[in-house]
Amino acid sequence: MKKSRFPLGVTVLVLIFFYLPIIILVINSFNAARFSSSWQGFTLDWYARLFHSPEIWLSVRNTLIIALGSTAVSLVLGTAAAFALHRYAGSRLQQAHYTLIYTPLVVPEILMGISLLMAFVAAGTGLGLFTIFLAHVTFCVSYVAMVVLARLQDFDFQLIEAAQDLGASWWQSTRKVLLPLLLPGLAAGGLLAFTLSVDDFVITFFVAGPGSTTLPLRIYSMIKYGNPPMINALSTLLLAVTLTAVIASQRLARLKR
Amino acid sequence: MKKPAIPESRSPSLGAGLSLLLLLLTLVFAGGCGPSRPVLSVYTWADYFKPELLKRFERENGCRVVIDTFESNEAMYAKLKAGAAGYDILTPTSYMVSVMFDQDMLLRLDRGRLPNISHVDPEFLKITIDKAMDHSVPYMLVNSGIAYLEGRVKDVRPTWNMFDRTDLKARMTMFNDMRESIGAALKSLGYSINTVDEKELLEAEAVLLRWKKNLAKFDNEQYKFGLASGEFLLVHAWNGDVFQVRKENPDVRFFIPEEGTIISCDDLVIPKSARQPGLAHALINFLHDPKVAAENSNFIYYLCPNKDAYPLLNAEIRQNPGIFMAPAIMARSEIIANIGGANALYIKVWDRVKGGN
């Protein structure tokens, strides 16, 4: 039987749809033209300027601090929440808990941003990196909990019992059985939290204070008076770093095996 | 189901988590050093100060200047109104300054600490809202006008009625901004852009509907790219944008219609929640030192209305009628005022223009 070409065609189209904008962005980061999309010659000027704008690097630093911090904390809290939800699934309390965890996923961002701001103001917390971190944890926890919960629902708890049967302590069975098996879920939740934190604009805008402008805030404000091609250059660099990290981690995983 | 394997090595998630935390701690502590100097927080548009000048201010005053940025007056206002504190200087547009002043959010300026505001151009102060500089000092001016491609548009006359040119049909754009576009139509009729007279507004609506037939779209952003590539031939534009596009397409020209135009002015203000009002006054005073004002304007390509800085400006700016408008046109130009309840009239007109055909 002749294989249909249709799936291949769809795959190619989808790939183009996903990656063409990124390719255009990378190409434009070397384009001397600032406004026209036509090619006006190769330049590294945008990269040079990028390395001379301390404000952008400051916001990159802020973004990374917040993303790493809120990912770490929301991973711990989210996983704990998922355990509670899974373990005591039937109880009234956990049903309420589930609703509470689920709500931040559906509440409009602007509402969350402004209510967090009002809460911080009422509590007298000075706005800054710390308040952004808290705000990001608030919504990241829900995403982590949902992802880990999905993983737990497929999890066979007899494995833990078997390990304990064979003499493993609680700590050993957790570290050597539960965590490794849960790792894909944790990694997925962590990556999701990290991504959400890095590109959040609306909530961050409201809870940011003096000296804590993050990269998305900086980029939006550059639309009025700033320099968009520099952003292309920065995105290209971020892309390169991410790709390198992904390839490196895949290599490492293969080496271990 | 996959067969579970108990790994020999330490669980990778623990290692990863630990290194993540370590990295985080180093980052936090690396950023936290040298806190003894006072910090002045400036909340402003991106790239709105020449960095070297701020460095100089830091040296002269033994402080650190931290810049944070917003992307619209309204978002900045919402945030401060909700109670965000800690910003010492803001640069909102005049109409937002009057809203904030009415809400009692701004500090009255201490004139004794601002000797340099005697350099502010008195001709410009005549058309501002806060004429006495009681709570705001003008910082930079942006003029609306018309930009076009000289090689492709024949027979250009410096008037808003260029939007009537049917030979440029679908190759023109106007701002997607209620006050700017209705203001242009009002000016073409010789009325004030801040009118609250319904009859005048209805006339302006008719003009806008007539112009709309010739427009490709209402737009505030893409027109720059369209003009650079030749997709649009004539656009309603802000002067600063046009001078940047012109570096790429030398065929671009800009004029301010002789009927007068809208001048947007961003002001320097100190919110009541400021923690460093003393340093904030010092920065306002510093920015209106004529030499500093000229250097700043030469860098960001907007005009600081400081009369003693004018002779020190680059010829490129000094001789540019798009930045330095002729006194007669300046006298006919206006600043967008906060018109309060009459805003509803404008919204109705704008809705009918956007919806009609």
Image (spheres, coloured by chain):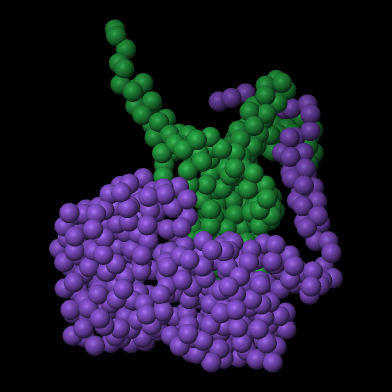
Chain colours: A green, B purple
Q: Position of residue A175 (x, y in %)?
A: 75, 38
- In the rendered picture of this protein, how many numbered marks are placed on residues? 0
Residue closest to the far top = A1
Q: Quadrant of the N terminus of chain B?
A: top right
- Is A92 situated left or right of A134 in this image? left
Q: Tell me the residue at 63%/66% (across/down).
A: B295
**Residue B138 seen in the current view:** yes
Q: Tell me the residue at 73%/65% (across/down).
A: B55
As displayed, is residue A180 above or below residue A232? Answer: above
Residue B335: which quarter of the image?
A: bottom left
Q: Nearer the viewer, residue A140 or B206?
A: B206
Q: Quadrant of the C terminus of chain B?
A: bottom left
- Is B46 situated left or right of A111 in this image? right
Q: Tell me the residue at 23%/63% (across/down).
A: B163
**Residue A84 seen in the current view:** no
Q: Position of residue A114 (x, y in %)?
A: 52, 71
As displayed, is residue B343 above or below residue B63? Answer: below
Q: Position of residue B93 (x, y in %)?
A: 48, 76
- Is B291 situated left or right of B357 in this image? right
As displayed, is residue B68 above or below residue A248? Answer: below
Q: Nearer the viewer, residue B7 or B205?
A: B205
Q: Nearer the viewer, residue A147 or A208?
A: A208
Q: Nearer the viewer, residue B136 or A219?
A: B136
Residue B39: which quarter of the image?
A: bottom right
Q: Tell me the residue at 57%/58% (across/down).
A: A218
Q: Position of residue A181 (x, y in %)?
A: 65, 34
